[in-house]
Image: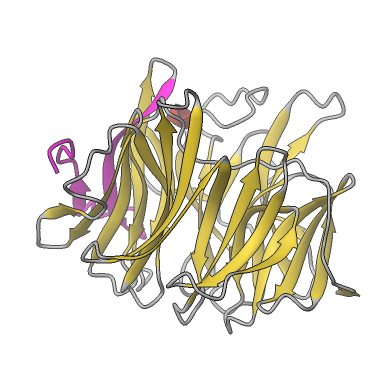
Amino acid sequence: MKKLSFGLLVFFTISAFCHATSSDIGRSEPKYIPDGSGIGLTYNVFSYGKIIIKKFGASYYRLNDPSGDWSDRKCYDFTFSPDGKKIAYIIEEYDFDKDTKYKYYLKVQDLKGNEIESRELDNIKYSSPIFSPDSASIAFITENRKGGVYLWIMDTDGSGIKRLADSARVNPVFTTDGKNIIFATYNGGNYCVSLINADGLELTLIADFHAPIEKLALSPDGEKLLIVAREFDKSYILNKYNIYIIGTDGAGLTKLTGDDTHDYNPVFFPDGESIAYVSLRDGISDASYETPRYEKSKIYLMDVDGTNKRRLTGSNLGEINPNISPDGKKVIFTECEYFDQHPCYHSIIQIDRDGTGRSESFEAGFDDI
C-alpha cells in the first residue's frame, strides 16, 4: 500500500448514489437485526416512505415518525448499529413551497423510534451512513449541487462531526477495529480504493482501479474487500457489473465474476468463506442498460475464491437485496417484478442457506402500519 500525505483532499469527482427513485413501489433493503431477533426494512410507495421493524413471532411496527405526515418523503440507506440498539437512514423530502427543491435528512433513532440525532440541509444529499464497530460513531457521505462529494464522521448523537476526505464515492466501510474507514474515490480519471484514519490525519492508498466502483463490502475478519465495478467495453456504450476481491493490504486483486452479464450487490457470510450476490446470468441481460433489470435478477452463492457458483432458489420472480442472518444459516431477500417499467417489490423472503426451508415470507401489507 502507498502512504499519501494528507491535509485536505480535493479531487474532482463523478459520483453515483444508488437508492430508490420516486417511482419505486414497495419494499426494499431487508436487513437482520444484529442479534438475529428480527428484520428491518424500508417501504417506499412513490414518495411515501416508512421504516418497518419485524421481530420474529411478533407484529410489524413502524419506526419512523408513526404519527406524522410522510406523504412526500422516502427513506433509503437504512442500517442497524452493530449493538442492535440504533438505526440510521436517509430521508429525501420534496419541498412543494420551493418547487422541485429537496431536503435531505440523516436520522439516527433507537429501536423504539426515539430520535437521537437528525441532521437537515437544503440541497445537500446525504448517503451511505454506516456505524462504527462499537456503535459510537457514524460515517456518511454528502453531495452538494456543485458536485462536491465528502466523507464525514460524527458521534451518534451528532457531536464531534468532522470532514475526513473529498471525492468519496459509494458506501464507506469501517475496518473491524473501528480505527479506519475504507472508501472509493475518483481522482482525475483514476479510480481508487483508499483507507483513512478515523481522525482524518493519514490516508493510505489500497489500490488503483480500472473502472467506476459501485459498492464495497468488508469480510468479517477485516482482511478482504469485495469491490463491485461497472466495466465498459471499448465503445463505452455497453457495460456490466462485476465483482472483485482484494486484500485490505492491496494484494491479490482477483476477478470473481466474468460472465457476460451483471453480477452485483455481494455480501459475505459470517464465516467469510462464502458470498451471496445478485446475478442476471439466468435471464436475458441487456448490457446496454446502465443498471441491472431487476425482473431478471437472481440470488446466487459462491465460495470466496469465486468457485462453486449456484442459484439459491428456483423462483421465477426477480430477487434482489440479499442479507445474511448473524448465525449464517439463513438468507433474506426481496422478491420483485416490474410494474410500468419500474421494480415493484413484492415480499421479503427468508430461506435456508442451502436453498431449502422457505421458512418465512413477509407478505403482509404495510400501507396501514
Q: Within the image, what quadrant is residue 157 found in?
A: bottom left
- Placement of the C terminus among the 4 image quadrants: top left
Give the residue drawn at x 66%, y 66%.
225
Q: Within the image, what quadrant is residue 364 found in?
A: top left
Q: Where residue 9 appears, x then y in whole percent?
A: 82, 62
- The mark total stands at 0
- Placement of the N terminus among the 4 image quadrants: bottom right
Q: Which residues are magenta?
A: 342-369
State the residue lying farthest toward the left. 58
In the image: residue 255, left or right of residue 274: right
State the residue lying farthest toward the top. 340
Specify whether residue 305 is in view: no
Q: Within the image, what quadrant is residue 184 found in?
A: bottom right
Q: Where residue 351 appears, x then y in whole percent?
A: 29, 54
In the image: residue 33, left or right of residue 17: left
Give the residue drawn at x 42%, y 31%.
95
The one of 56 and 98 positioned closer to us in this rendering? 98
Q: Where residue 281 appears, x then y in whole percent?
A: 56, 35
Give the residue drawn at x 47%, y 23%.
99
Magenta residue check for 350: yes
Magenta residue check for 362: yes
Q: Where residue 260 appears, x then y in whole percent?
A: 68, 33
Give the residue drawn at x 85%, y 58%.
208
In the image: residue 48, left or right of residue 362: right
Q: How is the image coloured?
A: secondary structure
Specify whether residue 100 is in view: yes
